Each structure stands twice: as structure tokens, then as C-alpha cells.
Amino acid sequence: MDFFSSMRISATGMNAQQTRMNTISSNLANSETTESEEGGPYKRRDPIFTAMPDREQFGEILAGQMDEHAQGVQVTEIQEDQKAPRMVYNPKHPHANAQGYVAMPNVNPVEEMANMISASRSYEANVTALNAAKSMAMRALDIGK
């Protein structure tokens, strides 16, 4: 695998984790939203990751025998969680039903914070891999001096 392939793969990982962080932030920001545009409470969202081959140009496909198993990642969709909303008793709330219960979003702040830490650490790991590839490329250039 050449330096540029490893840098592209790290970049796809950073992009995917950034999307994951944005989705988690949206989930936390809407954890008390009882009425959404679709109707009903906000539904938690998760990004769906898919592996993709690291090929950019036709020449790379032909010459890429060593890199044939190198894969990056991409976000293919943002999927809504289908779990039922939490029912909270609050008869004074404007969105309460006849029994006094309010349908709240299915967002668990503790779970979201754990996901945020995981996404942050994954992003940092990709930055470290990118910096290592950059450092190796710079040292390879120094050999020629």
C-alpha cells in the first residue's frame, strides 16, 4: 500500500466519524423534542457505514494488486431508530394524551455520550494513522537529500 492510499483510507474514516459525531449531536440536541416535522416525537438516528474499495483511477485498479484488499469507509445512509418512544407522565404538557402521558424521543443521553466518546477516539486513531503516513513520506523524501 502506498502513502496516498493509506492517507485516503484515513480520510474516509475521519469523514465517517465526523458524520457520526454530527448525528450524535443532533440526537442529544433533540432529546426533549416531543413534536417533529414528521409528527410525533423525534426519532434517534444512526449513520450506516459501508466498506468501499480504495480505488480512485483506472490505472490504480490495474496496478493495485498489492492493494486489492484495502478498503475505506463511507456513510451510505442515516437511519432512524425504530424503538418505541418513552412514555412520560406529565398531564400539564401540551402534547400529553388523554391519560396524561407524553411520547418522548427514544434518545438515551448516556448511550449517546458513550457513542460520542467512541466516535471521538476513532477519529483520533485515524488522525494518528494519517500523521504516521505523512511522517513516513517525509522521511522517505529526506533519504534523497
Image (cartoon, rainbow, N blue to C red):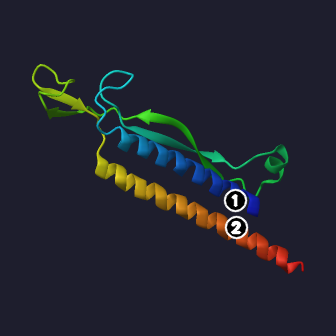
Vertical position of residue 133 compared to residue 66: above or below: below
Residue 21 x, y percent position in the rendering:
47, 49
Based on the displayed image, in which of its 4 quarters is residue 93 positioned? top left
Tell whether 38 sits left or right of 119.
left
Looking at the rendered structure, the secondary structure element under dot 2 is helix
Dot 2 and dot 1 residues touching (CB under 8 Å): yes
Vertical position of residue 24 compared to residue 67: above or below: above
Camera-side residue: 54 or 123?
123
Q: Is residue 70 something that shows in the picture?
A: no
Label disc, if present, on residue 7 of the rendered structure: 1
Residue 19 x, y percent position in the rendering:
52, 45
Looking at the rendered structure, the secondary structure element under dot 1 is helix
Q: Disc 1 marks which amino acid? A: Met
Give neighbour class at mark 2: few <14, some 14-19, many 20+ (Cα, 10 Å): some
Vertical position of residue 124 compared to residue 23: above or below: below
The residue identified by callout 2 is 133
Please give the name of the residue rendered at 81% of the width and 50% of the height, measured from the top-left corner: 60
